[in-house]
Amino acid sequence: MVDIGWLESFLALVEHGSFTRAAEAQHVSQPAFSRRIRALESWFGESLVDRSTYPVSLTPAGVKVRAGAIETVAAISAVRDEIRGRQRAPRGAVRVAVTHTLATTFFAPWWARCGDQTPVPCVLLPSNTLDAYEALFHGGCDLLLAYADPAMPLSIPVADVEWMVLAEDILAPYTAVTGGRPDFSLPGTAARPVPMVTHSQGAFLGRVTERILAERDVTLLPVAQSDFTSGLAALIRAGMGVGWLPARLVASELAVGRLQQVGDSTLTAKLEIRLYRVPSDKVPARAAGIWQRAAELAGDDT
């Protein structure tokens, strides 16, 4: 019989892309964590993870198991909380999967406006980009709020969903400011490469950054990496180096002169903030109401 803990460990591995980091997140030793993944693979009779890549990637069987694991873990957790009397989700709430950065910048004021005078109950489900799409496709949420790069579409079945553009953002390089002057400048040279803090290439914003840099002659020296965008912003503020961040995330820092954009417009990328849903006949009434209100507000980015 499959152990729910194996599924939770598998989803942690998918999220972190590393056995070491996933084990740390679950507060277990790496050998113990590895045994859980191998036990799950033994139960399915297939390899679920390609260990030859970094970050680790999923095999075709692993992709299928991830979809089922998300639903199973969510369903079991909900039943457990109900039995224990800890269910605190507001009744009739709209479940919204939101990528981490938008959860801390865009979501709250946008959601408040969607509700007009009466707040609409919601369950906010922060997630990385690919897992958020998986949740939408497999019924784990009602709506999805995520960044999209028009120049680099994700390889997802977009024909199975509807989407609209709510607003735009800009991914650009920033540096800390000391004494009124930027700590670093671009493009750098071979003799003096510019220190860089960056997302991993497996993260959505990391892929956009790589697309920008692939087309430009910039000399960088990676000094820190994280898929936690707010954490990268803190490292940039601390003077660790230059990093690519969404403009909305650093707007307040720019206003008070703590951060400054560096380089020119060729080192930036336009991002769209999109709202997704599955076909309308499968969307709960309250979520459909939010969709209609969002369509009315789309582009009105006040």
Image (spheres, helix red, strand yellow):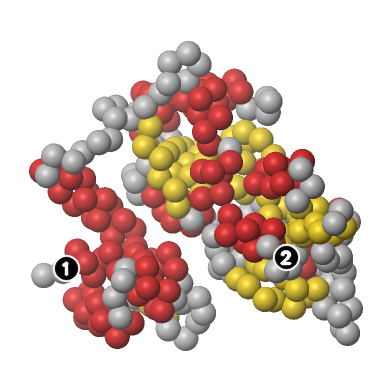
In the image, which is nearer the foreground, mark 2 or mark 1? 2
Residue beneath the point at 35% across and 75% down: 23
- Residue 201 lies in what quarter of the image? bottom right
Q: Is residue 133 above or below residue 35?
A: above
What is the spatial separation of the Cα atoms under label 2 and label 1, in whole angstroms?
45 Å
Q: Secondary structure at mark 2?
A: loop
Give me the disc on residue 84.
Answer: none
Packing grade of label 2 (10 A; few <14, some 14-19, many >=20) is: some
| Residue 270 can be seen in this image | no
Q: How many marks?
A: 2
Residue beneath the point at 31% across and 56% down: 70
Residue beneath the point at 57% across and 67% down: 226
In the depicted view, which residue is nearer to us: 181 or 30?
A: 181
Q: Is residue 76 left or right of residue 296?
A: left
Packing grade of label 1 (10 A; few <14, some 14-19, many >=20) is: few
Q: Is residue 100 above or below residue 162?
A: below
- Residue 92 lies in what quarter of the image? top left
Three-letter code for the amino acid on which mark 1 is drawn:
Asp
Q: Secondary structure at mark 1?
A: loop
In the depicted view, which residue is nearer to us: 215 or 92?
A: 92
| Residue 258 can be seen in this image | yes
Q: Is residue 134 left or right of residue 72?
A: right
Image position, residue 215 (x, y; %): 82, 67
Q: Earlier in the sequence, mark 2 or mark 1?
A: 1
Three-letter code for the amino acid on which mark 2 is drawn:
Gly
Image position, residue 168 (x, y; %): 69, 39
Q: Which residue is mark 1?
A: 3
Q: Which residue is mark 2?
A: 239
